[in-house]
Image (tube, helix red, strand yellow):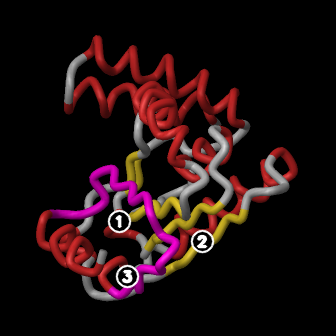
Amino acid sequence: MRKLSYLKYLFFLSKNWNIHLAFFTIKHEIAGEKKYCINTTGIDKLKRLSVVGDNKINASIYQAANYYLLEKAFTFLREEKSTGTLVDFGSGKGRIMVVAAAYGFEKIKGIEFAAALSVSAKKNIDSIQWKYPETNFTILTENAVKYNVDKEDSIFFFFNPFDEKIVLEVVKNI
């Protein structure tokens, strides 16, 4: 099953970007999924999913951030991990949350408006929680615009979850 999802994703990337970037990404997808013991690769069209709120028209497809870029970003953010909670807007299947835990973040929230993606995130986190017993994971299935930012929320992660209209509303809340 995973081989098929990698193949579909390769074709999607080749069509929408280019073949070289597609192979680079798939190489890191396979390595990342093995390294973190999760299943987050692929794309999901949100049209078919039930969501909280009325912002479906402003959302992007589900596509997780590339492991190569994530590991570079979290290496840079490593010093910030103890200052508060990392909040991943449009958390999808939980990839950012799991990688953040691997890089030492102990308080991580995912905000996702598609219930099916939140369920996938919970499965992925449940499968690795034993590796990070000190990490507090929270998955909220809600509209990002309605999320009340807590005082301890200090790092906000966005990987193309929605268009500029929603980003502006979320940033106002932050």
> Who comes first in sequence, dot 2 or dot 1?
1
Residue to which mark 2 is pinned:
139
Give residue 140's position: percent from left, percent from top: 55, 77
| Mark 3 crowdedness (10 Å alpha carbons): few <14, some 14-19, many ≥20 | many
Residue sitting at 30 percent across and 18 percent down? 21
Q: Which amino acid does label 3 sit on?
A: Asn
Q: What residue type is labelled 1?
A: Leu
Q: Is residue 26 above or below residue 134?
A: above
Q: Residue furthest left?
A: 165
Tell whether label 3 touches label 2 (CB within 8 Å). Answer: no
Residue to which mark 3 is pinned:
143
Name the front one of labels 2 and 1: 2
Residue sitting at 42 percent across and 76 percent down? 113
Give residue 48's position: percent from left, percent from top: 38, 69
Between 59 and 140, the one nearer to me in the picture? 140
Give residue 155's position: percent from left, percent from top: 43, 58
Between 128 and 38, the one nearer to me in the picture? 128
Q: Distance between the residues labelled 2 and 1?
A: 18 Å
Q: Please state the extent of the stretch shown in magenta in the rendering.
A: 146-163
Q: Name the side, left or right, on which 89 lies relative to 33.
A: left
Q: Distance between the residues labelled 2 and 3?
A: 12 Å
> Who comes first in sequence, dot 3 or dot 1?
1
Residue sitting at 52 percent across and 75 percent down? 115
Q: What residue type is labelled 2?
A: Ile
Q: Which residue lies furthest to the top in this view?
A: 20
Q: Is the magenta stretch mostly helix, strand or loop?
A: loop
